[in-house]
Amino acid sequence: MEPTVSADQVESVIRNLHHDPFQVLGPHEIEVNGNKSWVVRAFVPDSTEVYLFNPETGEEYPMQPAHNQHFFEVVLPVHKEIFMYQYRIVAMNGHERMVHDSYYFLPQMAEVDLYLFGQGDHHKIYQKLGAHPMEINGVRGVYFAVWAPNARNVSVIGNFNVWHGGKHQMRVLGSSGVWELFIPDIGVGEVYKYEVKDRSGNIFEKSDPYGFQFEVRPNTGSIVADMNKHEWSDQEWMEKRRNTDPLRQPISVYEVHLGSWMRVPEEGNRFLTYRELAHQLVDYVKEMGFTHIQLLPVAEHPFDASWGYQVLGYYAPTSRFGPPQDFQYFVDYCHQNYIGVIVDWVPAHFPRDGHGLAYFDGTHLYEHADPRKGAHQDWGTMVFNFERNEVRNFLIANALFWFDYYHIDGIRVDAVASIIYLDYSRKEGEWIPNQFGGRENLGAIDFLKRLNELIFSYHPGALSIAEESTAWPGVSRPTYLGGLGFNLKWNMGWMNDFLTYFSKDPVHRKFHHNMITFALLYAFHENFMLVLSHDEVVHGKRALLDKMPGDMWQQFANLRALLGFMFGHPGKKLLFMGTEIGQWDEWKEEHSLDWHLLQYEPHHKLQRFLANLNRLYRDEPALYEVDFDYTGFEWIDFMDSDNSIITFMRRASDYRDVLVFVCNFTPVFRENYRVGVPFHCEYKELLNSDSEMYWGSNKGNFGGLWSDELAWHNQPYSLGLKIPPLSTMIFKPIN
């Protein structure tokens, strides 16, 4: 019998040139002598014989070569209905195997999914694109789908088909640009990529943009993962989060780079795994009194020295520390110990690596084609095309994915300024104005607003934090008021002034007094988070303790006074790991913190100080309930620049719940220094950074004192205080 398919059609399949191989391969209804029948076709490059097998009846039909020794077909007997068949394949080495046919199965992507994705509004597109283990018609396998609208052909390649692009050619679904294929008889753990052929015939091997797991670098394959394997035990935490306003709660964040917090030198300086970190890091953070852990980016990235800020696998926690379910275990354990988890999220740019998003289908798909919009000059990376629906969908769904599948409590969005300004770090002529002639990236602004609206809609109680370094108005204001919709913004101005002030010799601080007070002029313009982050202890900036002037005693005293003032200043708090133990060296991502320092008295006493400060912060509503309104803060005296002393009050929502802060930023001990206070009562000394238990000089007020009926600083009463050198003291009225 003559082949039922033309030689040209066979050639197009063999050379992987057919846009829809389903038109040729698999079962097709035909007429034989005027009667209905079925023909089944298969391309099996490594075979000598192929048989069509009916597992229900045990019948077997030999398939015949058609125009090529590796292209087979068989015409079933007239009136024989198509059944769920398998192929018995005899390989060229004589080995036999039984497989189901990918080209038997109908498309699995619904029209509504394609429509919503095309509109940029499919909030759970990660449940459709990517690799998903599933069962269809009783057959187990993996469903693959990828967006590559300008590709001529796309195939799934992997160990299961010896990385042969002709064996599992995908079909494109209409004009959507989505290619899909169900591959039977494979499952979780398979390594795969997409072989993408552009219009000119160039071939690119790409990792899956929606891949849930990746090989350990330097390998770059995606791995089929089961995202529903972990059984969560954090229901209490999640329910409480849904019904809590985080802005009225204590937020003291421990910022961590998982690869360098602690390593195992006895085992080749290896990383701790997610499960090891769950017990060692989380238990430590709980002991230290922090409320949240913020992780430098954990999404998959190829280069360790990027610290995770050059992401390729946006939907995959890095495999450096274990598989996805182990990261789920880590977050779950955090929640069971009442620790929130914030992750750094990087939508500003992505690297140019050949297996990644760049030039994905032979065109500038995820990035702008024009380098004036699509290339980041400083970092050598690509900028997302925020004006393209499917790209916005990729990113927004990605943020929601981390909340959905990993139960994270917040994202910190990296480099927001580089997203919203078209001229960010660009010279004249290197950028393109928007349609109104301005420098605002309107598409990116819309993207950020929509992102935040959806996060808070799906996940009440979550945090969305902007690292935004300019004076863009309304970053942490709701979108319905014209803001970008974040609920917190990093206070970069405060951080720069704060560190500059404390790095100066105390004898000169009186000339720079405004640097420590200026931030209160704008403290309530945004919902600020005060940050001393990883960026301040790298690249020659020196460790935080090493920035402090004076001898070693003064350096530690300065740092304790700094931290005490920071926790009294309005705004949520963030400290980078190592601050609490007094690191002398800058942070280096290739080795762990200098934990050996804790054998020395000043270091372990500094650690004790920060733990006690965190506990006080969590216990006193005046320190966190009213962070973003002027009613939560009141200066007592900010004018004493000659003595470098500032005094102020923090108030809770209950106006009578007050704390008094007294900060001395010189090494001079002050006796009988008068400070105005609002009530006539005993004032208990809750914390003195100069206490001997913190390696201070142990000067102070014997745990507290009564106010005098002497008006001072526009207050009806006052305290005559002994103020230790380089110290922060906190007093609470006992009514």
Image (spheres, rainbow, N blue to C red):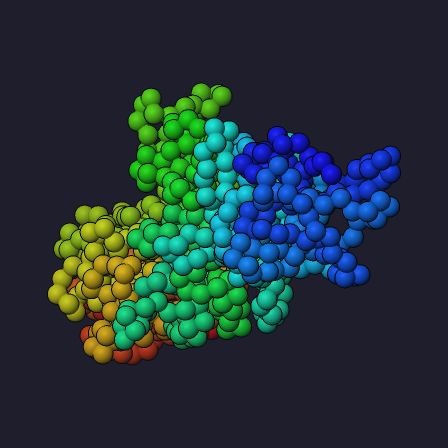
Q: In which quarter of the image is the N terminus?
A: top right
Task: From the top left corner, tell me how far across and down residue 397 is, in percent.
Answer: 57, 47
Instruction: Say which of 519 and 581 sits in front.
Output: 581
At a point 38% along the width and 28% down the height, the residue shown is 371
Classify residue 352 as left or right of residue 225. left
Q: Can residue 464 be seen in this view?
A: no
Instruction: Say which of 61 and 238 sits in front.
Output: 61
Instruction: Say which of 698 and 204 sits in front.
Output: 204
At a point 33% along the width and 30% down the height, the residue shown is 426
Task: From the top left corner, tell me how far across and down residue 6 is, in percent.
Answer: 66, 31
In which image quadrant can residue 505 be found? bottom left
- The image shows residue 91, relative to residue 327, as above or below, that is above
At a point 29% along the width and 59% down the height, the residue shown is 589
Task: From the top left corner, tell me how far across and down residue 721 is, in percent.
Answer: 27, 69
How many discs mark residues in the rendered view?
0
In which image quadrant can residue 134 be found? bottom right
In which image quadrant can residue 701 be found? bottom left
Task: From the top left corner, tell me how far across and down residue 580 is, in percent.
Answer: 30, 68
Classify residue 249 as left or right of residue 511. right
- The image shows residue 663, relative to residue 499, as above or below, that is below
At a point 30% along the width and 27% down the height, the residue shown is 427
- The image shows residue 271, relative to residue 476, as above or below, that is below
- The image shows residue 675, relative to residue 300, as above or below, that is below
Q: Is residue 330 visible?
A: yes
Classify residue 583 as left or right of residue 473. left
Classify residue 720 as left or right of residue 522. left
